[in-house]
Structures are given as C-alpha cells and as structure tokens.
Amino acid sequence: MTKRVAILISGGGSNMVALAEDMRGDHPARPVLVLSNDPAAGGLAKARRLHIPTHAIDHKPYGKDRAGFEDALQNALELAKPDIICLAGFMRILTPDFTAKWAGRVLNIHPSLLPKYKGLRTHQRALEAGDSEHGCSVHEVTAELDDGPILGQARIAIRPDDTAETLTARLLPMEHQLYPAVLRRFAAGDRTPVTLQA
C-alpha cells in the first residue's frame, strides 16, 4: 500500500522538491501535503507547481503558545492523513507531546554527522573543531532535539580553504540524494541506514 507523506518546510524547500520529485513511478510513497509555518516560504509555490496540496500556519500569532501552534499543525495533518512526516528545513522545535503522537513516523534531515553538532551553525562548528569531514544525517524524530535513530548519513571531505558557505553549497546536493534514498527505504519498511560518500 502506498504511503502518504506530509513534508514540513520553513523556507525555499529544496529538500522538499528532491523528496517530491523522487516519489514517482515505483516509489512506495506519494506526497499529500506541503505545510509551512511561514506563509511566505518559497517552497509553497514550488510545491504548487508540483501539484502538491499546500497549507501554511503562521507561527508568529501564537507567540510562545507552542501547544496552540501544534494544535493547528495537528489539525492540518489529520486532514491530510499522512503515514510519514518529513521535516525538510522546518525551523520550529516540536514538543514532546507532538513527537509522541507521531512516534516512529517522523523523519528529519540535519546538516551534520550526528551525534555531532546538534542545533544550529553546524558548518561553522565543524570548521572551528578542525574536522576533516562533514556531512548530513537523516534521523527519526524523538522528543530530544536532533536525536533519534540515524537512518542515513552522507559525508564530504573538508578542504583547507572551505568556509561555512562553501560547505553549505557542497553539502546540499548530498542532502538531495540522501533524504530521498532514506525515505524510499523507510516507506518500504526498511530502516537499514543509507551511507553516501562524495
């Protein structure tokens, strides 16, 4: 049975596009919703061009009422009835209550080789640490930030002249390969980690 996938974004949605464009043909899943916390997110227009239903719930009016925002999120998701939720540059931290409701069904992509560098500024932190390699990880979402079982990683070598900007630019194509590969496997019921090397 084909799995239904909701993709949550906050910005341009390049990983969302990579996921959606892969969910064709013999893929075990199809996108049923692209949802953003920013009504102006560029990814919403891209999703509409791909004929995926979209919805926006502006988080700003909710202020510090995270439960209220997540109730609205939950309502939108329940209408779409997804089997899997993919966070693709969704810049809101989800509460334990929300993650518990969707336990084992939410994936996230993070720009570091987890468990290293949870949170923000991952590229700069890898450079400051003198690391020889960097990468991205796809993991199951749990109540802990950027935690949960790792389902895939892609690695790139750090060059002597790299900056946070050049690392970002070189890592993004790897993200666009890794996330679809993990989702394809995950939607088929296979949690064996995917490993990619540039």
Image (spheres, grey):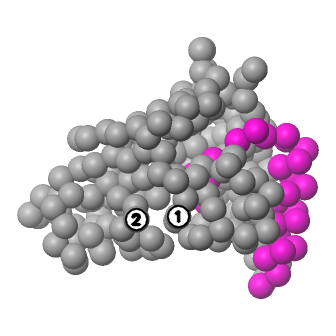
Q: Which three-letter amino acid code belongs to the residue tagged 1? A: Asp
> Is tag 1's residue or tag 2's residue first in the polypeptide sequence?
2
According to the image, label 2 marks what residue? 115
The picture places residue 34, in percent across and down from the top left corner, at 71, 45
Q: In which quarter of the view is residue 158 placed?
A: bottom left
Picture quadrant where residue 48 is located: top right
Q: Mark 2 falls on what kind of element? A: loop
Q: Nearer the viewer, residue 163 or 3?
A: 3
| Residue 21 visible at all | no
| Residue 85, magenta (yes or no) | yes
Q: Is residue 35 left or right of residue 195?
A: right
* Numbered range of the magenta stretch: 64-90
**In this orientation, which residue lies closer to the viewer: 4 or 41?**
4
> Which residue bears the numbered disc 1?
147
Q: Residue at x 24, y 50 (%)?
A: 156
Would residue 11 appear left or right of 134 to someone viewing this image?
Answer: right
Residue under the image location 53 percent in, 38 percent down: 191
Quadrant of the image containing the N terminus = top right
82 within the magenta span = yes
Residue shown at 76% from the left, 38% from the top: 83
Distance between the alpha carbons at the discs numbered 1 and 2: 7 Å
Check disc 1 and report its element: helix, strand or loop: loop
Residue flagged by tag 2: what amino acid is it?
Pro
Residue found farthest to the left: 160
Contact (CB < 8 A) between labels 1 and 2? yes
Q: Is residue 42 left or right of residue 85?
A: left
Asked whether the viewer can see residue 72, the reply is yes
Is disc 1 surrounded by few (<14), some (14 to 19) or many (20+) residues within 10 Å?
Answer: some
Whole-percent x and y of residue 77? 83, 49
Q: Position of residue 166 (x, y in %)?
A: 25, 59
Left or right side of 125 for 11: right
